[in-house]
Amino acid sequence: MNVTKFLGYDGKTEGNVVITTLEALINWFRKYSIWPMPMGLACCAIELMGTGASRYDIARFGAEVMRFSPRQSDVMIVAGTVTYKQAQVVKRIYDQMAEPKWVIAMGACASSGGMFRSYSVLQGVDHIIPVNLYLAGCPPRPEALLDALMKLQHDVMQEPVLRKQFKA
Amino acid sequence: MKKTVKDLALRLKAHFPDIIAEPVEFRGECTCTLLDSNRLHEVAEYLKDQLDFDFLKEATSIDEPDKPLRFTLVYELYSYYHRVQLRLKTSIAEGNGKISSLSDLWASANWQEREIYDLMGIQFENHPDLRRILMWDGYPFHPLRKDFPLEGKASECGVLFTRPAPMEGGPFVTQPGLLDDEDREPRSRTPENKF
Amino acid sequence: MMKIESPGLEHPKTNFNSYREKTNVMAEIKDFEFEEMGSKSVQPSNAINESLGDVMTLSMGPSHPSMHGVLRFKAEVDGEIFHRITPDIGYLHRGDEKIAENKTWHQFIPYTDRLDYLAPLCNNVAYVMAVEKLLGIADQIPERCQFIRVICCELARISSHLVGIGCFGMDLGALTVFLLAYNEREKVFNLCESLSGARFTTSYTRIGGLSRDLPDGWLGEVNKFCDEVLKAIDDLESFLTRNRIFLDRTEGIGVITKNQAISWGLTGVNLRGSGMDFDLRRDHPYLVYDRLNFDVPVGVKGDCYDRYILRILEMRESVNILRQCVKMIPSGPINIDDPKIMLPTKKRVLTQMEDLIHHFMLATEGINAPAGEVYFGAENPKGELGFYIYSKGGGSPYRLKIRPPSFVSISVMPLMLKGAMLADVPAVIGSLDIVMGECDR
């Protein structure tokens, strides 16, 4: 259905003003309340907890709701080494998350297996789930995680939410 | 009365003269090698009851494929009374590598032996619950053996899978134990002669 | 007091004839009474299944809110009581031991950081001392290096116990404790960062010495930190030690007797909590611990509360040790002077031929260790971390086995949680202070 006809005005003359403003509003709500699902597996989980603690406060960005409930979260932060045994768990939890969802692969181990090139380590979590942001570091500093969160917020802001809904 | 570890090792040898080799001292530690692995439980019972070794710190296994008795089991025992540590080693062959479990003497042997079974493939008799502990139950290989490559092999087990890791030319390090200058060169270790 | 009785076949619910005959059912239902948990024995699950079929298999999966890492429990519960609980580990098994066979001695130091990632400096020191024991240079390490290593170990101990208590409190619902503990940890991270460049995962020690010397003014900052952390420990204690809820949830829970602790191979705080007076730093002193005065606190009952109190007391003792070290530390070299083991200084490498050759050999092939086997155990905050090295000569170990304290601690859990309630699980895990990076390696 053509979105302009739905709203009762002609987009060709005025431009997609209403849609993009609504989108900007929705995305603005989304980006300042990204609730992470912390998949804290190894040492990077300590930096994740440090980011949630009082010095590098992730609550400033609206993301302190680390409730370990996949249904209610937006971004999964895979922090730590993903082994093959853990891979099934990560995939299952990722599948339980509701759209829209993003993934941050935090640290070298989640991005590409890190320094553990062995028989039991999955060489990067992007083999099983699609990753939006790779964060380098072993472990990355909390500031790096906050920077990643800010880049993710920038990505969220660019997303054509309503235009995707109404595409034929 | 507290004894030194050498005294205790000699007492052990005196009690089992033909199956315990001469105790070896290296860097202040004492190692007793048990030549007959079938009598491990008997020797362990003697160590625990008579010589007061009440703490099994560690149970390890070593894989030396070029030896006739391929696997060596190493037990680190500690005595809280004498405050000494003793190492007990025994070797078993590969074919029907079975050895009696020590989990009825020291409860810490339970999980240690499960790990040895998981990673090295040595079976333990009379173990209460011998199954894999670090890898999953259907994993077909024993990873710590020398003929298993570091990057692993592909396998499927229901929803679990493994793939070999990309090595890009192999681990760039020498093989241990070779003293020849040529062999100590890291680039001499090709994927063919990896172990 | 409530006592839960296991329903037998005389229970009115199972025997339907007698149930129908009874006019007043309420008179038949007995009062419930609680006995002390943790040491109850319950009927095996088969009998329960036959009578009621009430046992549910619950999987407390690898991803769970308690911050101890990826640990899974398969539990059979009857309402709130556990009949059997089986821990399932291996979700963080990275193959460290196999990796060690393919690395030189120095290249394995970063992997030891990631073992117990809450106290990485301790692991570095333990590994490097095991290799130095193999090489036979353990008594040639300069004194300044030994003092710095002790300072690093004790800082790591304080840091690890802070996390232990912080996460213990958080699992039981006291979130402020976690934030306070992490605030102090940030100070330790600052110290580590100025020392080695990384907040944790420092890889600070080298075989035969350290990677670099202390920066200027660092010891003064350690002194300042000691004062601040004592205040913070007092704050933490004011939250938990006399807290009614905390006492109810941890006293009498997860009791291990002394004989059970020895038989199951527990070490460290878990062993001392059960009344065994043993500490590797005092009884088999390594580094300069024989020159320092410190007490070793020992528990009485072996329950969760005892272990918590022991960690608090150990933190205070660590502060004591830190102050002594800062006073006693001498000046001097920090690395041994053997070019076959320690990299020569850059100036010599670029000017002397022999040192150039040594540098090349050490960097490419690693230290040429003698053949032999050693075991070295260090008193880590979580217990005794042991390294068993079997070397056939050459630059890399033939077999390296890591003896992790958390592996042993988790194996005791089925014993501790038999007959316990569901809510005791976080208390027990928190009191054992487990980290999965070490357990699974």
Image (tube, coloured by chain):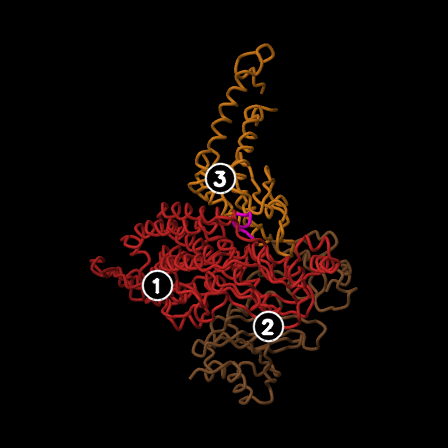
Kindly identify the residue that appears in the image at 55 percent across and 33 percent down: A152
The answer to whether the residue labelled 1 contacts the one labelled 2, judged by CB atoms less than 8 Å apart, is no
Element type at marker 3?
Answer: strand
Say which of C231 and C76 sits in front. C231
Name the colour assigned to chain A in the rendering.
orange
Kindly identify the residue that appears in the image at 53 percent across and 81 percent down: B41
Label 2: chain letter: B
x, y percent for residue C370: 66, 70
> Is C84 situated left or right of A114 in this image?
left
* Residue neighbourhood size for the residue with mark 3, other residues' Cα within 10 Å, grouped as few (<14), some (14–19), many (≥20): many
Name the colour assigned to chain B in the rendering.
brown
Kindly identify which residue carries mark 1.
C303
Which one is in front in this view, the residue at disc 1 or the one at disc 3?
1
Kindly identify which residue carries mark 2.
B123
- Quarter of the image where one finds residue C335: bottom right
Q: Is residue A90 visible?
A: yes
| Same-chain check, marks 1 and 3 | no
Spatial CA distance of label 2 from label 3 is 44 Å
Name the colour assigned to chain C in the rendering.
red
Kindly identify the residue that appears in the image at 71 percent across and 69 percent down: B177
Q: Amino acid at mark 3?
A: Pro
Element type at marker 2?
Answer: strand
